[in-house]
Image (spheres, coloured by chain):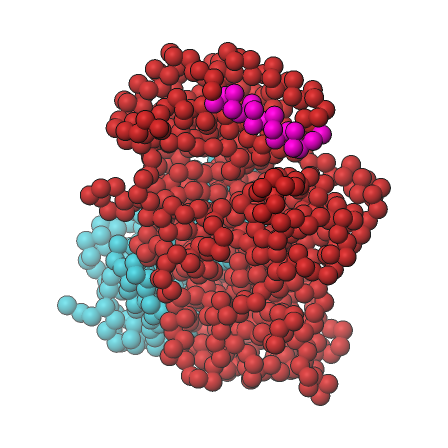
Amino acid sequence: MPLTQAKNLPHTQGDRWTMLAFRLGIVALLVIGCAGCGTEEAPAQAALKCAIPAGQKPDSAAELSCPADFAALAWRPPGASIPGARSTKTIVDTADANQLYFLNAEKFPLHYPFAVKYLSGKGKPLVKDQGSFAKEYFSPTRRFLLGAVTAYDRPGQAQPTIWTWEIAPYDTMSKDQIVQAYDAVAAKTWFGKELYLHLNTQALTTLAVQLPKRIKVITTTALFAGSTFQALNPGTAVGQLRFYKVEDLDAKKTWVTPRDVAVLDRVPNDISVVAGLVTAQLQTPLSHVNVLSQNRGTPNMALVGADTNSKLRALENRWVKLEVTGFDWKIAEVTKAEADAWWQAHKPAVVAVPKLDLSVQAPRDCTQITSADVAAFGGKASNYGQLAHIPDLPVPKAFAVPVYFYHQFALQHGIPGKVAALLADSKFTDDPLVREKKLQELADFVEQAPLDPAFEALLAAKIAQDLPNQRVRLRSSTNAEDLDGFTGAGLYTSETFDPANPSKGLTKAVRKVWASLWNLRAFEERTWRGIDHSAVAMALLVHRGFPTEDANGVALTNNLFDPLQPAFYVNVQKGDVSVVQPPADVTTDQFLHYFAYPGQPVVWLGHSSLVPEGQQVLSPAQIAELGIALDRLHQAFAPIFAKTGQFFAMDVEFKFNTDPGEPSKLWIKQARPHQGWATTGGQ
Amino acid sequence: MKPFFAGGERGCSRGPSLWSAVLVALVAAGAGCAEEAKPATPAAAGTSTADTSTADTAGSGDAALDVGADAAADTAADSGVSDAGGADAAVDPFVAQLGGACPVEKRIGRFEVLEDALYGSSVAGNIADRIDALQILVAQQTEGACTLWQRKAPTCTPSCTGTQQCVRDQGCKPFPAPLSTGTVTVTGLVKPVVMQPKGSNLDYFFTDFDAAPAAVSSQLQLTSPGAAAAALSLQGLGVPAIELVNPNWKVTKGKPLSVQWKSHAGPWQIRVALNVDQHGLSPVTVLCETPDTGSLTLSANLITALLNFGVSGAATATVERRTADQQTVGQGCIELVVASRVAAEAIAQ
């Protein structure tokens, strides 16, 4: 049966997975939730004559003449790992009279297999190995013009579907080639007059000014203006649907519980354990609350106006099942019994922490520590030690104080007994307000308890020797953080010791950091994952401070949104303004850096509100410097944490800092394995 | 000094036959042209050359090669022939003249006579005016006959424009432009092949074969008069079809991978390519080169190292039996590979 009208290629049924290879990750994340929208249907569609026979799903078609044609070829993944809009790939074969193909994207998630199967030999130039095919994205004399047609649904907006033609972010197609391919696609689609070229890279945006006016263009920002839904961490949650104001939570006027599906009026900087989270404002994927959600395995979505959404309000305080996929969400009421049964079946996996190694009883340089030393130096310092082993990685000189000293301190002051008493108190375990009060009392106790003078002298001498006459950061490093499967990100406290400032003394800093072991949020997270509180202790990571930050940020060393196209995902902000817990209404620079690809293109996904429009937080040279470091780091940690067949990325904290008389320099502060996407809440 | 690609004339010498230390030395010194350095091409096709080769010990040690899975195994050390036929046997003159594949860091053109289970039989090739930076890989780890190669995209700041590519230590350079060498004729095949360059990439190709393009041990010759690119004269030898004994591979961290095929003694070599693809741009590939003994083991260390670079998309694996010849053109090199290739079903675990 003809696949294309002209080419007599066979129909086949598609298989199941795709990569919407030319869509952008975060861009895809911002796709508006739209189950069953079908909004591409134009008013005049009744008059359209489809090119593909009803009910068939060919491998390709030569034209898209009606919505059903597009539906037969387009695909979006059913799972949560790769979010996105519906898309079909396009190929223009310049060696065959510019024949155009719209591909069955489900069966051919990449252009290459289709080209091998249908466009090689039999009078056409051979399509060789996949490595050689890469030139089709770069060569000025390439044979194929590769792209994708994507439908972005925008329910409720004046233009409910935006049709775009997109090229890969690393594609170096010339102006003429773009025009050629765009015109070909526009001529063979029923929506051709409304087809936009998606300016998904800076290079393409620059090139756009040279394009003929007939080519409609749209920027990522414009494309997603008015987006109302994000699936930050897809999954399923069962709980009681409750509405909160962040202001009330911050003021301790109310409290969330682990069995809440919480709807918040805005994005909080922190939230205790909840079964599922819905915010009425959009988030960023690396925000603290999303990292928490990923760590907990609980779904997290943003739905603009969620706090007034009638569908949600109708279920307020009822038991519900919330399902968040990469593209949409649904919610349904359940009975209390069903909720209980679900919880029984989806208890969080218990995290086993390494048993404390108390044999190490002296500070140790991080160059002498590796990821295998969690039991003695905690997760953060151990991974930091691994960083220090990576050649040419800009890591501040550091040492670590082993857990032994906290353990001794705790024994000296009877802390294990105090904790045991708390855990035996049902008021403490059952009432979050009591729990908060008692834990604060415990933390206060730690902050007031005297340090062992010998330890204090030892630490002061080490700092004086290794990091003299400067501000020093003391950072928490428990044996229950930065583990594979439990990051414990953002749970504990770092403090500064400044020898020139009596208010930032060493004793105070040590006790403040140690006291954070009993932060409520840390306690709640450990409880959620079944961690034995009595088995946890805190080491200290000690390195220089960064008083003059030019920029700070967080990066993932893999493409969270499209693992088939490796890229670094970077969130960065000017100065020392937090990326993961930003002030209200402050946005960050966000971009994907396709470092492994020729040309190493950067795709901008968002811009900082703290730099003038048209500027970026990092210079191109700084982005390149960061990319080199992230590449080294990723490769160094892969043998330790990567599991074949699973998404692997390191979550990296970095800074650019300018010391007096020095140029701005990159520093890698921390790296921990990233949790990836959740699949089912509560697991 | 002659231009690199003087129309209609040989730009430079034929490449070294790595069988001959003398020729290696000559080529290393830049002396001698191919037509001067090798004997006249035997005309008889189908002549058996089994048991006629000698050991290939020459190798440049160049740590670079091309990224393509089919073309990816061309180390500078490749002679294109093997010693599987017996070290004491006399060297067939035709076999002896095969110069092996180009050092990838010099390769600007490639022709291939291929029998491929997936692609079918074909003759194809093209030539560019310069080396493609995309094809350069860097050796990361070698174990036995196998090496793990990585492509590292160089950084150019500011980024190169669309018609340029970033070349390590050189900045932005024009992307290679295709060149014609005029009509290309290949003799010794099961049918005569005459090709003209076609399309924007000036591709030469011929795919009208019903079965293998060449009889086993048939002597092939590729010639062209030259045009923008130099005239060519390259030789090859028909190879037996490759057949895997174990076509399903499980690539598992910490475990060696055994590759087995039905061996055929002769002056050819076996190449194995394995990667865990990333949209066809996999930055790492394991490549092995070995005599046609019927088996090869990729070490557990190498497999682990490969997988540690990350797995995305489908794993791809090919095994091929082949001979190769090369011709130096200016500061570049053009090669002819005659191969039988088969893909394995590789699953990364």
Q: Position of residue B175 (x, y in %)?
A: 33, 67
- Lateral position of residue A265 relative to residue A635, left or right: right
Question: At x 45% / y 27%, what residue is drawn?
Answer: A512
Main secondary structure found in the magenta portion: helix
**In the rendered image, the vertical position of residue A641 relative to residue A123, given as above or below:** above
Residue closer to the observer: A173 or A381 = A381
Figure disc tally: 0
Q: Report the residue at 65% width, 65% height from top.
A: A75
| Whether residue B193 can be seen here | no
Q: Nearer the viewer, residue A243 or A360?
A: A243
Q: Is residue B255 above or below residue B16?
A: above
Q: Position of residue A612 (x, y in %)?
A: 36, 62
Residue A95 is situated, as x and y percent measured from the top left of the image, at 48, 78
**Residue drawn where x is 72% and y is 51% of the image:** A322
Query: A89 above or below A306?
Result: below
Q: Which chain is tinted red?
A: A
Viewer-nearest residue: B102 or A311 = A311
Decide whether residue B320 is among the magenta residues.
no
Percent from the top left, x then y, of residue A343? 76, 39
* The magenta stretch spans residue A440: yes
Which quadrant of the figure contains the N terminus of chain B? bottom left
Q: Which residues are magenta?
A: A430-447
Q: Which chain is cyan?
A: B
Q: Nearer the viewer, residue A545 or B109?
A: A545
B252 up-or-down from A58: above or below: above
- Say which residue appears at 70% left-offset and 72% top-offset: A38
Q: Is residue B87 left or right of residue A302?
A: left
| Quadrant in the picture for residue A525 | top right
Quadrant of the image containing the C terminus of chain B: top right
